[in-house]
Image: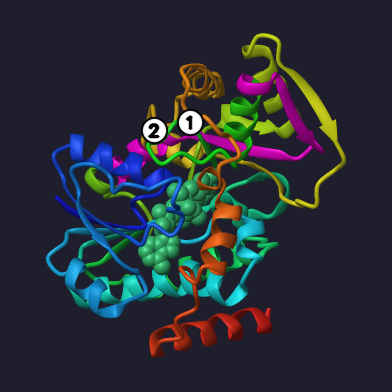
Amino acid sequence: MRVVLLGGAGYIGSVISAELLANGDEVTVVDDLIYATKERRDKPPFGTNFVRGDFRDENLLRDVVKGADAVVALGGLVGEPACDLDQDLTVELNYASAALAGEIAGECGVQHFVFLSTCSVYGRQDGLGTEETPANPLSSYARTKLLAEEHLAKVCQGNLSLTVLRLATVFGLSPRMRLDSVVNSMASRAARTGEIPLRGGAQWRPLLHVRDIAEVARRALHEKRATHPEPYVLNVGSDEMNYTIEHIAETVAGRIEGARVVRTPQPEDQRDYRISFARIREVFPGSCARGLGEGVDEIAAAVASGEFADLDQVGYDNLRGLRLAIDENRAKVLRTPAMRRLADEYEGRWTQA
Ligand SMILES: NC(=O)c1ccc[n+]([C@@H]2O[C@H](COP(=O)([O-])OP(=O)(O)OC[C@H]3O[C@@H](n4cnc5c(N)ncnc54)[C@H](O)[C@@H]3O)[C@@H](O)[C@H]2O)c1
């Protein structure tokens, strides 16, 4: 199968690339390596056809998408603080680029579009969020991802089917490592300093190992999905992996000798949700089985073996990396006609709401 990964050189994309290559797929990655710095030269995933470029570029998209069987859109800005830095940039990278890629995939005769979305679209919920629970997006991160889902559902029609994967918070080792997400940050700091900073702690957060999402992406692309509703939305994670932040910190402390939790004041983050993963259990039995301990142990072992010499290096932290990319003019708003059209649609959708 010929698969195009948009944003495929990032934390999750590097692991999905390896999974698909091992499966015998032909993988093309489009990525602008926006977090690469002098200290950290991000490399394209080994073995892929790598196109360094901007996935908002219509001509580039048409060139790479033509002849592909499937497109996976997984680029953009991740998490609320990064998305709050520049609203217009967030709309282009998270919403408009995915919407445009879906439109072009349809024109080019692609059969399957997979969009990596987020459980953040549930925002704050009482009870378990299922795929049918009305979304409650509390941030521009969640709003851009949700509108991308909605737009893709409209353009992925006929021969082009759509799968939306709403990911839990991802953890575990990747060749393009991020140490800014909750588990990776706690585990790496505990292994290096013995301290686990804990802000707040009562909020629920579902977790997902990075190799599990890679397997789910492969299965979504390859396994027959005859019985599913269209468009197909799947929460990706497992019921056993709904944790509170405090429980994550305690688990990390319990697995790393000498580590202790250090509490700091409650954060601004309002997200608080527990998710039902009943549908994915039924559709992809046995998926998302890796536990929190496995990820903590592998990160602690990597730190102990001398990887991540400087945990504060900007390349491990998307928020600081994005600030630098904006300051150095490597990440900027394009305002092409397509981006303007889609940005207007975004504006209209959320001012009506
Ligand atoms: N990491 C998580 O915990 C998590 C949780 C839920 C959902 N997701 C979703 O998964 C996807 C991937 O997340 P990640 O953690 O791998 O992010 P990441 O930041 O590591 O990767 C994103 C990639 O997109 C690339 N990119 C950004 N703008 C670009 C542009 N204009 N042109 C070309 N490339 C560009 C970056 O260079 C980077 O390699 C995102 O869509 C995110 O919303 C991630």
Report which residue position mark 1 lands on.
172
Q: Nearer the viewer, residue 103 or 61?
A: 61
Label 1 residue SS: loop
Using a 10 Å C-alpha cutoff, classify the residue at mark 1 as few (fewer than 14 neighbours), some (14 to 19) or many (20 or more).
many
Residue 200 vs 157, above or below: the answer is above
What range is drawn magenta here?
A: 191-220
Q: Is residue 332 visible?
A: yes
Please say if 160 is above or below 256. below
The residue that label 2 is drawn on is 211
Give the amino acid type for the residue marked by disc 1 in the picture: Gly
Q: Nearer the viewer, mark 1 or mark 2?
A: 1
Q: Is residue 24 left or right of residue 50?
A: left
- Across and down, in percent, residue 133 comes to 61, 55
**Most foreground residue, 196 or 72:** 196
> Residue 149 versus residue 324: which sits nearer the camera?
324
Question: In what quadrant does ligand 1 lie?
Answer: bottom left
Q: Which mark is residue 224?
A: none
Residue at x-position 64% and y-position 27%? 189
What x and y, as percent, mark residue 197? Answer: 75, 31
Front residue of 122 and 183? 183
- Please give the name of the residue rendered at 40% of the width and 87% of the height, measured from the top-left corner: 336
**Disc 1 to disc 2, how far (Cα)?**
8 Å
User: Quick check: 101 above or below 322?
Assistant: below
Q: Do the residues bearing badges 1 and 2 touch, measured as CB atoms within 8 Å? A: yes
The answer to whether mark 1 is within 8 Å of ligand 1 is: no
Look at the image and tell me whether residue 75 can be seen: no
Q: Is residue 304 magenta?
A: no
Q: Please tell me whether residue 217 belongs to the stretch shown in magenta.
A: yes
Percent of width and height locating residue 34 = 43, 60
State left or right for residue 140 relative to residue 51.
Answer: right
